[in-house]
Image (spheres, rainbow, N blue to C red):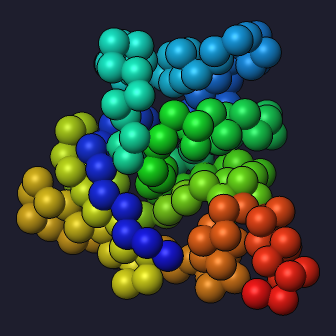
């Protein structure tokens, strides 16, 4: 899998799917303009609304239990749509993590997220299980992502992965 590098947006613990995108906003014409609007970091939504399409490659950092709440895939597909490169958290809600794999969105667990600050530039290297903080010149170990999950992520999700298998690739 490729390395991902981007600017950090920092969030707290227990960010649920309604904080990521409210259920009442999901069916709107441009629901992404409300992405992360109910979280503890109001600066992201303000920045996104002013800088549309300039967040490609940015990375979310969060505490424990990111993605708790409902099992709506929209909370991940919108992040993918706007160009968020990955989410790094201490832990993810189980169904959220499974949905991330299914849609081909990298969710990375790391015990050292408290050492990463808003605005830092980090690089995630899944193959070497490291996050390199280019701002602070530090590195942190990440939890292992099994090779079969990395293959699904590399393919872009479970459907493209299965299509590759069916084609014999």
Q: Residue at x 49, y 76 (%)?
A: 1
Compared to residue 43, the image places residue 166 above or below, namely below
Question: At which x and y percent is residue 19?
Answer: 60, 23
Q: Is residue 2 left or right of residue 21?
A: left
Q: Is residue 121 left or right of residue 42?
A: left
Q: In this view, does 167 lie to the left or right of 110?
A: right
Q: Is residue 164 left or right of residue 87?
A: right
Q: Residue at x 11, y 54 (%)?
A: 135
Question: At which x and y percent is residue 125?
Answer: 37, 73
Residue 168: image quadrant is: bottom right
Compared to residue 131, the image places residue 69 above or below, namely above
Q: Can residue 143 be seen in this view?
A: yes
Question: At which x and y percent is residue 167?
Answer: 86, 82
Q: Where, quadrant-wise, is the C terminus in this rendering?
A: bottom right
The total of numbered circles placed on residues is 0
Residue 28: image quadrant is: top right
Seen as rendered, the residue at the extreme right is 166
Q: Residue at x 64, y 17 (%)?
A: 31
Question: At which x and y percent is residue 10?
Answer: 34, 37
Q: Which of 88 and 27 is in front in this view?
A: 27
Seen as rendered, the residue at the extreme bottom is 168
Q: Which residue is drawn at 70% across and 11% down?
A: 29
Q: Which of 6 and 94 is in front in this view?
A: 6
Compared to residue 114, the image places residue 3 above or below, namely below
Seen as rendered, the residue at the extreme front is 167
């Amino acid at each position: 899998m490729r390395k991902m590098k981007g600017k950090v947006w920092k969030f707290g613990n227990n960010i649920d799917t309604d904080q990521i995108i409210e259920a009442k906003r999901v069916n709107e014409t441009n629901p992404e303009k409300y992405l992360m609007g109910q979280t503890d970091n109001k600066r992201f939504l303000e920045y996104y609304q002013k800088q549309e399409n300039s967040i490609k490659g940015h990375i979310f950092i969060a505490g424990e239990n990111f993605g708790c709440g409902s099992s709506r895939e929209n909370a991940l597909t919108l992040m993918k749509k706007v160009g968020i490169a990955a989410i790094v958290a201490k832990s993810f809600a189980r169904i959220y993590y499974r949905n991330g794999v299914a849609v081909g969105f990298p969710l990375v667990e790391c015990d050292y997220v408290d050492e990463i600050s808003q605005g830092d530039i980090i690089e995630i290297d899944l193959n070497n299980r490291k996050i390199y903080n280019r701002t602070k010149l530090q590195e942190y170990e990440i939890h292992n992502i099994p090779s079969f999950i990395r293959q699904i992520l590399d393919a872009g999700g479970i459907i493209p992965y299965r299509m590759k298998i069916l084609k014999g690739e």
